[in-house]
Image (cartoon, helix red, strand yellow):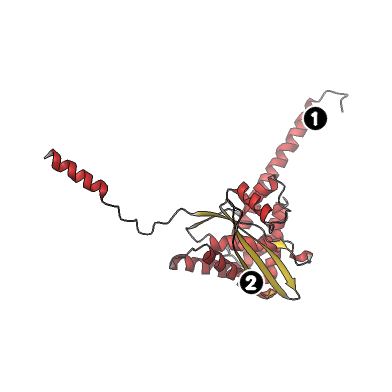
Amino acid sequence: MMLSLFLQVVLLWTIPLAPIPGAHLRARTLAVLNFDNNTGRADYDPMGRGLAAMLISDLAVSPDLRLVERERMQDVLKEQSMQRSVMFDSTTAVKAGRLLGAEIIATGSLAAAGTELRIDMRLIRVETGEIIKSARVAGPEDKLFELEGQLAERVLKDLDVALSPESAELMRKRQLANREIGVRAFRDFSAGLLAMDNGDYVRAAELFRPLMMQAPGSPVVELAYSEAKRRAALAAKEAAKKKAGDALRGLFKKPGRA
């Protein structure tokens, strides 16, 4: 009887387990860096931020990708004084990717000729610095959102990521909601991200507020507006603490000392 029980245990250990339905391989960490402005036009400077934010929103629907949050990314790059670096340069981009703990980084640039806009993008493996894939999309400036959607599709294809019908539908809904702000107002959204990156959270919130009314269901606008308000409140609290501290030190300062 003991031998029979032993054989049953051995059989249980040797029979391969069936895969869990819907189980995914370990998600790969992807950082989408701000796109560089190579148009020669200053009004395009903030738009690389808006474009990166839209891509992060789209790609975050995939369980096979773990997207680095935009604000965490900006905080890390700011600490390292890398915010103004040319991120389309592979060496700089790889350094940024390592700081962010990303396995893959997406970096790109904007170029323009008249009303035509061109977006170049590279996917880079951080460990080796190799360029996995590169892509280019081009079209009229007023088709910016369609160009961004094409880039999102290219990233998924190049990384061999297949969306489930549910994830594909979620991405479609996110894109439609984000596009409610319109191409013209996209400049204000991008300018708000630039203001937030520069620490002007009140100005950022002022730029995002009307966009919330214009596109109340937009995930990127809602996230940016909430973050701007949160950081503005924290900055105000810190300023109040510093002012109170300065006043307190003034009370205890010995007379006659500057």
Between tags 1 and 2, which lies in front? 2
- Where does the image place residue 69, in percent across and percent down from the top left? 59, 53
Up the image or down, 105 lies above or below 215; here it is above
Quadrant for the N terminus in the image? top left
In-front residue for pair 175/233: 175
Name which residue type carries label 2.
Val
The foreground one among 77 and 9 is 9
* Residue type, label 1: Gly
* Badge 1: residue crowd in 10 Å (few <14, some 14–19, many ≥20): few
Question: Which x, y percent locates residue 197?
Answer: 70, 53
Answer left or right for 201 relative to 61.
right
Mark 1 → mark 2, Cα distance in angstroms: 60 Å
Q: Position of residue 46 (x, y in %)?
A: 72, 61
Q: Quadrant of the C terminus?
A: top right
Instruction: List the residue tagged with mark 1.
Output: 250
* Residue lying at 66% horizontally and 45% vertically, measured from the top left: 234
At x 67% / y 68%, what residue is drawn?
119
